[in-house]
Amino acid sequence: MLRVTPLYGSHGHNPASASLSIPPSSTLVEYGGVRVLVNVGWDESYPILDGPAAASGSEGEGGADQIPPASLPDVDAIVIADSTLASLGGLPIYLGRRGRARRAAAAAAAAATSAAATGGGGGEGKADPPAIPPIYGTYPTLKMGQMTLYDYHATQCFDGRDPGFDLADVDELFAEGRHFRPLKYSQTLNLPLPVVPAEAGPKRGGGTAAAAAAAAAAAVLQQPPLLGITPHRAGHVTGGAFYVLRRLSDETEVVVAPGNAYHHAKERHLDGATLHKFGAAADVLVTSPGGSGGLLGSLYRPPSSGGKAVLTNSTVSRRETELVELVMAALRRGGNVLLPVDASGRVLELLLVLGRHWERQRLGSAYNLVWVGPMAWNTIEFTRSQLEWMAAPLGAQFDSQRGHPYALKAFNICSSLAELDAIVEASNGNPTVALASGASLDSGPARDLLLRWSENQDNAIILTDSSRCVPRGDVGAARVLGLPGLGQKVGGVGQVATGAVAGEAVEAEEEGGDGAAALVGAAVLAADVSLQSTAAQLLTKWCEAKSAREEMADVVDVDVPVPHRAPLAGLELQAFLAEEEKARKRKQAEKERKAMLAEVEKAKESLHLGDEDAGGVSTAAVSSDKSASASARLAGAKAKSGAVTKRPRKKSRFDQNLFLKFSKPLHMTFTVRDETVGIGQADLVATSFGIAETARANVVEDDYGIAVEPERFVDIVTGIDPSKGSGRIADQAKGLGFGSDGRPLLSSSAMVSSNDDGAGPDDADAADDERALEAADLSEGRGIIRGRNGRPPIKVTALPRKIEVLAEIAYVSLEGRVDARAARQSIRALQPRQVVILGGGMPKIAGALCQDASSETAISEVSLLSDAVKSLSVDKNSHPVFAPSDNETAELNVGHAAYSVRLVDTPYRNQEERDAAAAAGEDLEEEAIPEPFEAKMGECTVSLVENVATGQRVAADGSIVVAPSASLADGSRHQPSVMISDGDVLLTDLRAELISQGMKAEYSTRAGYAQLIVNERVVVRKDQATGKIDVEGPLCQDFFSIRSVVCGQYVTL
């Protein structure tokens, strides 16, 4: 039995959904006794789980239908298709510290409720945090997914929003080999994983190591593998994969290939998907219709009244040419071009398309080509090391020493808009093409450039990926649940309702105040905020113009979230100061504890408790063991006080451990050196003590040298060197903001003030430190910048502002995913027995993002795909198509009804034949005589003519015992039937008839015979000399259907 349950995100292709993008999803697949979760996507389409929408949605009307579930179910493994937010954005939200605490609290509350209902009494117990299941994906998914989450966290935090997770959660989950375990293409993973229980290990006080090993091996053997999971290349993004789930008991296969995660066409940086190669034997295909949703998807379908579709699916090369032409047209008229892109996915294709055009046409001196994003430098470094996961021509170019394909000689990579401004200024203001991070245009550098360039009609904004034209989940949830306005948590420290802040800004502006006067555009009330992101608003206007077959309006009004800073005041300020005081006390207590431990170590040094005594105790042994025995310390104290007359030996300057290191291996053996300062060690070890003074710095040393303190180096994420500047930087700068080169990454044009007075290097360093501290504060997700240098704490919020876009707006589909028509063709080529279609469910937030489902444009791609599947079914009465909604389970019977059979040579006799033989004087063995039966194979019955199923089974493996009939024991046989045909039966005629019945037949010839391979299972072979036709294959429904077609060519006498 196969069970497929969409947890959320199953409404992307429903006609009632007005969203242009396919929402992030998560699907539970239960097959072969193993529970596998496919993808845990998340983006701005959903409100945060800790906000008021979650509380109201769980208690108000609608309940769990309004937002995704608060926690994930228990599973054996999680598989991730690619590195986009739609596939892995929810991993740190659900499996991070906040998500696990939320789930543990819910479990504790449920246990308390159950105990109260049963009258058990029991006090409140603190539930243990749930274990993190293993996460599987390809290596590029691991690294690029990390960059995607870093970028998402940065863009959300810098607008004062709460991303729902911390950077520590990302680092913990994506630590290679810990929770995230990378797989290669075609590498099979068997589940469940063999787990040795703790009690199977060696126990103290009894048993031997061999017995413990045997017990552990026996415990492992108790869990045989049940399911094999194999990733295969899916295209779309680097490392993208679809998964084949193979039940090991009968070799049946389930292929999980979401339509938004695979692409058949070859691109510049990726080869096409191998779905047709490795998914041809699928018994069940779990997929989605493909293409875009909402109004954009309807433009690719012909109207019901007849005629051609507004848009057609052209080839990849034609779309690339269209993009280059649009870019060059804007540059030639003196305008700038903005291309909103993701952090580490489809942007790699655009880098090659535009970079090669710039190099071939030598446009670098006339136009600037810039890639700007918080993680741009890190992403390109990971990309350059992953050529084996990309298209074969890129690897051949590198191997032939023609340069690295991602050298990007034509590109200027920037971490902030300040660097972009410097590049434009150095080029004397040349027109610029900017690939900017923040594809939704609600945050990030792309939003900041939109605010700069939208008022110039010579500029152009080109959208290439509709998957990031997402709805605003917080606003939609607020409308449905009747909340005043949602941007973040209400009532918590550092979080205020977006609607309330917007209302205050509007009132201040109407009264002539300067609360929002410095922001661009006009203020927007909370009730008038659009349900769609800025990119979705622009794309909707473009689709409406295309649908009406008109040109777009010269001016397009959209509302954009603009960062706004204001001093923290009121209850929020009090709560913030209270939390800061608690944190200060915790740090002070920890500092005092460390100081006390340092004093203890210093006292032990002064008393020479670690020196060698007369008993021959080694200094290295004592120093390496921090918890020396009480008897050793007592003996040292007595020697010092004179109780022992023997004078302690002086400490030798000769370190005998040098000989030990080279005489025998001491791997994983650490010693502590005195008076040693290495790279990365604390400065106080070298500067706090004078000549002839010693301090035990506890410098850890192993066979590879002196260990270092990682916090003494520049963090590749924060880019801050704690050894420079004040201690506040070293203590507080733990968030995003700077790269490994020390340059600012997150300085947004709307948030970083420029220095126009020509400040010196010291002032520049101070400004960098200030921005670093601000980045560290905002990375906490509270939207608060701590007060420094006499300034009060600052609250950062994103206010919706109405702006007019005069720039040209265009859309070129370079999404790298299969379209709806190609998805239907894939179904016809694969011919699976059953299909589960994801994306046809009703929208979660019903009524918030809905359109008229009865209109002409509301033609469901799910229904078209379902019709294509049903046309392939041999049994017209069956229902091989399932389209479950969220939290609905589709149950499918998967299997070939094949049995293991053991053939014996003893003839089978029924009771009458045994009585007759006994009357004739034959000696028969006394045994129970079971009644024969016929094996049922699907809807067909196996014809038992020469052999009879005895009804017995082999005890070892459960095989059915089949014996020859007693009537055949004397050698007599039934006369074979005579089959006559009208002329020669041609395999080509058989092939045409099999294809007409929905089967896949391949014709081939060999020496002496020709054959048809039908559905890759059954072989129809014809001997060219005799004309004899044989049908071979497993006993399944296809076999009997094919045999019926072959026998239908003859008349049986």
Image (spheres, rainbow, N blue to C red):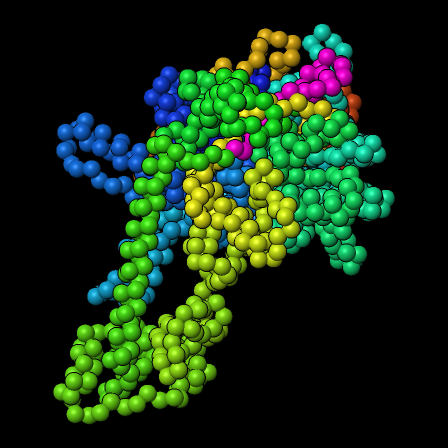
Q: Is residue 181 visible?
A: no
Q: Quadrant of the N terminus?
A: top left
Quadrant of residue 873 in the image? Answer: top right
**Residue drawn at (36%, 39%), measured in percent from left and top?**
576
Query: Left or right of 698: which side holds 486?
Result: right
User: What x and y, as percent, mark residue 752?
Assistant: 57, 42
The answer to whether residue 467 is above or below residue 180 is: above
Residue that protrudes farthest toward the bottom in the picture: 646
Q: Nearest the camera: 201 or 819?
A: 819
- Spot occupied by residue 83 in the image (x, y as percentages of width and height): 57, 41
From the top left corner, tell me how far across and down residue 876 is, in percent.
Answer: 58, 16
> On screen, 197 above or below 833?
below
Picture residue at 68% right of the left edge, 16% below the top:
544
Which residue occupies 78% across, 22% down? 983
Does the magenta-highlighted stretch encompass residue 476?
no
Looking at this view, is 432 or 659 the one in front? 432
The relative height of residue 993 versus residue 668 in the rendered view (above or below) is above
| Quarter the C terminus occupies | top right
Residue 592 placement, left or right of 7: left
Quadrant in which residue 919 is drawn: top left
Magenta stretch: includes residue 556: yes
The residue segment tinted magenta is: 540-564
Q: Residue furthest right?
A: 361
Residue 437 falls in image quadrant? top right
Asked if residue 483 shows in the view, the reply is yes
Residue 1050 sits above or below residue 283 on the image: above
Q: Position of residue 664 (x, y in %)?
A: 43, 81
Q: Total of numbered circles in the picture?
A: 0
- Asked if residue 434 lies left or right of residue 15, the reply is right
Residue lying at 76% horizontally and 51% vertically, measured from the top left: 409
